[in-house]
Image (cartoon, helix red, strand yellow):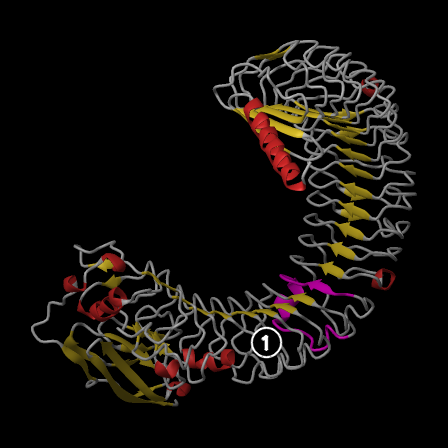
Amino acid sequence: MKPGRLSFYLAVFAALSLFYWTSACPKHCECFDLEKNEYSVSCHGANITAIPRDIPKNTTYMDISFTPITMLRRGDFVDIPKLKELNVWWNLNLTMVEVGTFDNLPTLTSLGLYNNSFTKLPPGLFDKLTNLTHFDAHNSKLETIPPGLFTDHPSLKEIFLLYNNIAHLDEGAFGGLPHLTEVTLALNSLTSLDKSAFAGSRKLTSLNLDGNYISSIGKDAFSDTPNLQNLNLNDNNIHTIEAGAFSPLRHLQSVSLSSNELTNIEGIFQNLLELESITLDTNKISTIQNTTFANLPGLSSLSINYNNIKEVDVDAFKDLNGLQTLSLENNEIPEISLEGLYSLMTLYLESNKLQYFPNNLQDASQLQTLSLEDNPIQEPLNAGQFSALFRLSNLYLSNITCLKVAGTLNPKALCGSDALDEVWLSYNGLSTIPATTFACTQVVSTLWLQNNNLTELSPGLFHGLTELTWLDLSYNHLSRLDPDMFTGVDKLRILDLTGNNFTNMAHVAPTLASLPMLASHDLDKNPFVYLGPESFPTPMKHATALDVSGGHIHVVEEETFTATTFPNLTRLLMYDGNPLHFVPADILQGLHNLSAFIADNDPFHCDCQMKGFTTWLHKQAKPPFVYVFCASPPSLQGKNLNDVSPDNLTCDCQHEEAPSIDTSGSDTSVHEGQTAMLKCKISGCPEAEFFWTTPTGAMLAVESGFPRMEVLGSGTLVVTEAREEDTGVYTCTAVNYRGKAKKEVALHVVKT
């Protein structure tokens, strides 16, 4: 035969084979060619009322789902000699499975009957499935496991029955299974354990009984499962475990008993030589004695969080020289010793009642993570407090009483811990941090200083932290940063300044501009009142996002955001309550890379002052995403600015004009302790926005919340309890879309 003709016949044969396969697929099913002459058939939907009979003989995978089928019968699965995996799932009307249903599937290795509605399965159902290794019937309303369903099955390895209504395990329910390794009975209604349920299944290594109602564990509960390695008993009602209950489990590696009612664990875990992990979170344990965890040489992880532990013997852990992780969070421990914990790498002690730092730190010299947050430690944080921990990498010291009392740090407290990478010092009420505090920790990459009382930072505080990438200074009282604050800190990528007292952008922007890796500027919830050309004296060439949401911005002036100042800005965020009534026409014109301007929940007056910006927006062929809504007038309230015609943006002015200012009647001299009234009477139409600038450069507007200084709606600045340092020149500025006015008032405070 000529080669060309042979190729033709082969192509025709392939096409015919494909046609045969497609045409052979049962109605309402989907068929897929897998590989090596294996096929998958998936049948689902309300049109399938019975198991299809015309399943291709070489099908190896099949699933039946989301059908109204009510029963599986003998003869439903015939003439599928190669089927390996069958899943019948999410058939909510399926309430019965007949004995013999699967008898004609000798090659089946995996059977799933989950998310159905049968309450029982008959004994003998799997007798002919001599190759079955995996069975899953989770969430199927099963109430019982009768003997003979799984009993003595020759090949089953894994049985998953979680999320059913099984209340009792009959004798031999899982017995005589020579290859059974894993059983999951989580989220059922079991109240007790019967050792006979697993009799003869001696290869069982994993048993999950989470989420049942078991109240006690008898000493013989696991006598027939000597090879169990992983045991989960979380979320039960266990209040008693008899001494020796786990003794037969010589190969036990992990036991989890969280969320139970245990008060006493003495004598439960002793002499389990291969045990590696114990979890006892959320119980009612009150004491840990020096015999509680005796002779557990393999234990590497111990967690007893959220208990009532009030007492820990001095040598409670002395024999656990292989322990690597110890977690005792949220207890009432007053003091603790680390004696004998030579391998400990992670220690969590937050939210206890520690009065002192842990004792015998030298024994735990391998420690890498130490968490002491939320403790009433009275002992001072001394120089080199953690110097014995030469590998310490993560140190959590937030909300520590001794730091709150001191209001500062010992400048050498962190010295000797040269490997520190992440340090938390939040919620400590710190008002000052000595300039050399971090001189000993020059590899720190993450530093958390949020929620303190810092009003200023030493200019050299962070110098030398060349690896610092994340610094959180949020929710302090900072109002100014030195432009050289981060000299040499070139890897800083995240700097959070949320919720401070910055009122003048020029007091912080030059510092941010000096950081070459800083892309996002988190300045939200600061009381900024004004953004203008002088707000960004240094180009913010690395900034891709600027967030000044949730502040007090009243005025955004023309030429604030230009291609020179923000060449790479993609997101401008001013949402969530800034009292902005209008923005200038050119606010976005120079930002060629901008993709989004978000300013929702700001009270914009959609009048003539918004006409210029709206006109520009409507003329753009590909405008950025603009999320701005009108708060007034009533006819436009709630409308997206994108949907408002510029023709509807008008002001009720007989004559539009730029604002003018009259400061006559202002106090120019007062004595200490008196109140000074600085007047700023503003005229012009449309109504102008205004703010005051103090001699220190702070910018204030109505409801700024500045100490001793309040701006009234009339324009007057009230300075109460005047001090000598209040002496200087105050400037009132008024802006509308027609222009800008400024006037100065000199105040002298006479010392008494």
Decide which of 61, 510 is in the foreground and name it.
61
Residue lying furthest front:
2
534 vs 35, left or right, is left
**Horizontal and vertical percent for residue 429?**
57, 67
Decide if residue 213 is in sight here: no
Q: How many C-alpha atoms fall within 10 Å of the one at disc 1: few (<14), some, or many (≥20)?
A: some
Asked if 513 appears above or below 546 in the picture, the reply is: below
**Horizontal and vertical percent for residue 631?**
24, 58
What's the residue at 84%, 51% (across, down)?
A: 323
- Which span of residues is magenta-colored? 392-415
488 vs 520, left or right, is right
Q: Amino acid at mark 1?
A: Thr
Decide if residue 571 is in sight here: yes
Q: Main secondary structure of the magenta part?
A: loop
**Horizontal and vertical percent for residue 350?**
68, 54
Decide which of 183, 670 is in the foreground and name it.
183
What's the residue at 86%, 64% (across, down)?
A: 362
369 vs 459, left or right, is right
Q: Is residue 503 magenta?
A: no
**Horizontal and vertical percent for residue 42?**
58, 27
Decide which of 559, 240 is in the foreground and name it.
559
